[in-house]
Image (cartoon, grey):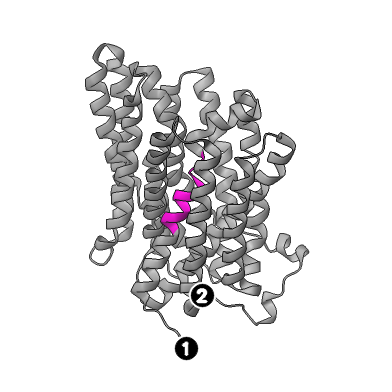
Amino acid sequence: MRKISPKRELDILRMQSFLFGFGVMAWVPRFPELKAHLHLSNGQFGSLASTGSIGSLIALVTVGHVIRRFGNRIVYNISIFSVMACLLILVHTGSTAIFLPVNILYGSAISCFVIANQTQMFHLQNRTGKIHMTHLSGMWSAGALVTALLAGVLVGRVSLSVHVSVLAVLVFSIMLYGVFLLGPELVGPDSSSEAVTSVRSLVSNFHFDKIVAWGLLLACYFEFAVGDWVTIFTKDTLGFNTGLNTIPFISCMIAMILGRLTIHRLFDNHSIEKLVKLGSLGAGAGSVLGFAAAMILGEKHSVIALIILSAGLFISGLGSSFVGPVFTNAANTRSSSPASVVMAEVAFANVILVFITKWIVAWTAQVLSLGVALFIPAAMLLFVPYFAHAVIVKKD
């Protein structure tokens, strides 16, 4: 029987995460073209694009139990193929009636793949005794950053439909081959009677670790805020109308990638709880300093403000890079349930909490100012240490 080593399996999982980030984020930088193709306003397009969350929530209620019942192979293959097919439809259709259900399915397929990949990583961690979860986040971020840079190069040269279509077929075909390579170690079906679950029991038995859920929200929302608002903040506050307004965002993303791909070297010789506390406090302080400097210096000293903001967000990205993945890992180590079920339940809670937090930040920006609103994710990082004890608890 064909076998693969733990190192080889880790390399394949890292490749899958990179390609997934590269593939699913390929169309995001070109949303303005997609909005124009659909003939929608900003508000209409934003509302339509957000419907992917509906599919995500539906999938997260069920996918953990599907993996437990049928194994990881079928979820991997169906989710990858579905993401590819949905992307091809989404970038070609000009009909909102078609876009809506396909986008819901797209969100569902993305969540299914994420849970399958995390489940496979926990399967590897159980055999090696080491934490590898930060690798997945790091490689996904790297893929998302590279595809954003590629999209910037292709805008005006290659159409959205050709760009995404060619990329989707190539990337997701390679990912399907990656599933084949993982074959010998893929998580199989659970043959126990507990794996057979009715729809009613899915709802009644649904629960999540509240300490981990709140810690994860405080740790991970900063990355969402940076992606949603930092380029707008830099443009509005410092007056940069060219590509310079993306520098703080890129600085933060590079730091996150570096942190996620290297932090595992410290896990063997340092307390993970202390690393989480130091990382989150440093990240919170860095972002507060960066946002405050930008607001105080403004357009009058825009270059200095840009440098301080970029440096502050680099520190924030580095410090917060591994904290979210560590809380995700803690959710599994604190539970006796199968990893697939735990990850789906935690992700479900996180999607809802992040959605609510996004609304709070958005309306704070509307009522007060974007600068004031960005202090919310910065302050959230400073409260992470109150939940850091969760990362050291082991499974019963």
Circle 2 is placed at which residue position?
Answer: 186
What is the x, y in percent for residue 18? Answer: 41, 55
Indicate which disc residue 1 carries. 1
Considering only vertical position in the picture, is 297 above or below 115? above
What is the x, y in percent for residue 109? Answer: 61, 55
At horizontal 34% and vertical 26% (from top left) the residue drawn is: 243
Range drawn in magenta: 17-27
The one of 81 and 332 positioned closer to us in this rendering:
81
**Secondary element at tag 1:** loop
Main SS category, magenta section = helix
At horizontal 43% and vertical 69% (from top left) the residue drawn is: 394
Mark pair 2, 1: CA separation? 14 Å
The one of 357 and 384 positioned closer to us in this rendering:
357
Amino acid at circle 2: Leu
Residue 90 falls in which quadrant of the image?
A: top right
User: What residue occupies the far top of the structure in this picture?
Assistant: 300
Amino acid at circle 1: Met
Is-magenta flag for residue 135?
Answer: no
Query: Nearer the N terminus, badge 2 or badge 1?
Result: 1
> Can the viewer see residue 219 in this picture?
yes
Is-magenta flag for residue 19?
Answer: yes
> Can the viewer see residue 377 in this picture?
no
At horizontal 35% and vertical 48% (from top left) the residue drawn is: 321
Considering only vertical position in the picture, is 294 above or below 48? above
Residue 261 falls in which quadrant of the image?
A: bottom left
- Give the mark toward the camera: 2 or 1: 1
What is the x, y in percent for residue 49? Answer: 61, 37
What is the x, y in percent for residue 69? Answer: 66, 74
Circles 2 and 1: CB distance less than 8 Å?
no
Within 10 Å of disc 1 (Cα), the crowding (few <14, some 14-19, many 20+) is: few
Within 10 Å of disc 2 (Cα), the crowding (few <14, some 14-19, many 20+) is: many
